[in-house]
């Protein structure tokens, strides 16, 4: 099994930037689909960005496309989410998730993932 731990969240003013990290242990992330989700207070969990393997196309939600960039570092077994031009509506707990048996049509669906980190809080102030 794989264990995931997010870090890098914090308080940032609107228009600022943060970089989130998801450190994996136990297994290589090369084997897994890796995806970022977020959940704001009172709202459902929302897909942010993900891809099925290293080097494959990265999919983004329309709300973050052009502002957020996902990447993988194989040597560190870590996935990153660079967040620029942050908006108040980006405020949420951000989670990374992993799975080995997803098809492309399931990548955006949180209920399909077997492994989750505990999350990291991102708060964007106005």
Image (cartoon, helix red, strand yellow):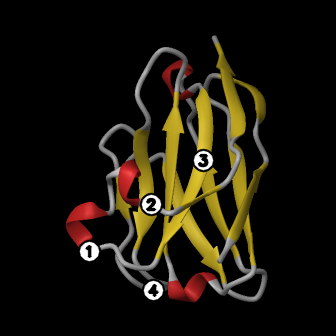
Q: Residue at x 49, y 46 (%)?
A: 37
Which sits earlier in the primary sequence, circle 3 or circle 4? 4
Which sits earlier in the primary sequence, circle 1 or circle 3? 3
Which sits earlier in the primary sequence, circle 1 or circle 2? 1
Task: Tell me how far mark 1 sits from mark 3, CA to CA.
Answer: 20 Å
Dot 1: within a 10 Å radius of its alpha carbon, few (fewer than 14), some, or many (20 or more) residues? few
Which sits earlier in the primary sequence, circle 2 or circle 4? 4
Residue 100: percent from the left, percent from the top?
A: 44, 79
Q: Secondary structure at mark 1?
A: loop
Which numbered dot is residue 55? 4
Query: Nearer the observer, disc 3 or disc 4?
Result: 3
Residue of label 1: 103
Quadrant where the image shows the N terminus = bottom right
Are discs 2 and 3 less than 8 Å apart at CB?
Answer: no
Q: Front-most of 108 and 55?
A: 108
Task: Tell me how far mark 2 sits from mark 4, CA to CA.
Answer: 20 Å
Q: Is residue 122 left or right of residue 97?
A: right
Dot 4: within a 10 Å radius of its alpha carbon, few (fewer than 14), some, or many (20 or more) residues? few
Query: Nearer the observer, disc 2 or disc 3?
Result: 2
Residue of label 2: 113
Which numbered dot is residue 7? none
Dot 2: within a 10 Å radius of its alpha carbon, few (fewer than 14), some, or many (20 or more) residues? many
Residue 21: percent from the left, percent from the top?
A: 72, 58
Residue of label 3: 95
Which sits earlier in the primary sequence, circle 2 or circle 3? 3
Quadrant where the image shows the C terminus = top right
Q: Residue at x 45, y 86 (%)?
A: 55
Task: Tell me how far mark 1 sits from mark 4, CA to CA.
Answer: 16 Å
């Amino acid at each position: 099994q794989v264990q995931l731990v997010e870090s890098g969240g914090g308080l940032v003013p609107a228009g600022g930037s943060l970089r989130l990290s998801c450190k994996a242990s136990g297994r290589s992330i090369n084997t897994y689909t890796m995806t970022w989700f977020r959940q704001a207070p009172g709202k459902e969990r929302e897909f942010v960005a993900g891809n099925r393997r290293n080097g494959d196309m990265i999919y983004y939600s329309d709300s973050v496309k052009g502002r957020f960039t996902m990447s993988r570092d194989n040597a560190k077994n870590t996935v990153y989410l660079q967040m620029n031009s942050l908006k108040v509506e980006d405020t949420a707990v951000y989670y990374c998730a992993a799975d080995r048996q997803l098809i492309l049509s399931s990548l955006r669906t949180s209920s399909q993932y077997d492994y989750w980190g505990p999350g990291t809080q991102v708060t964007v102030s106005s």
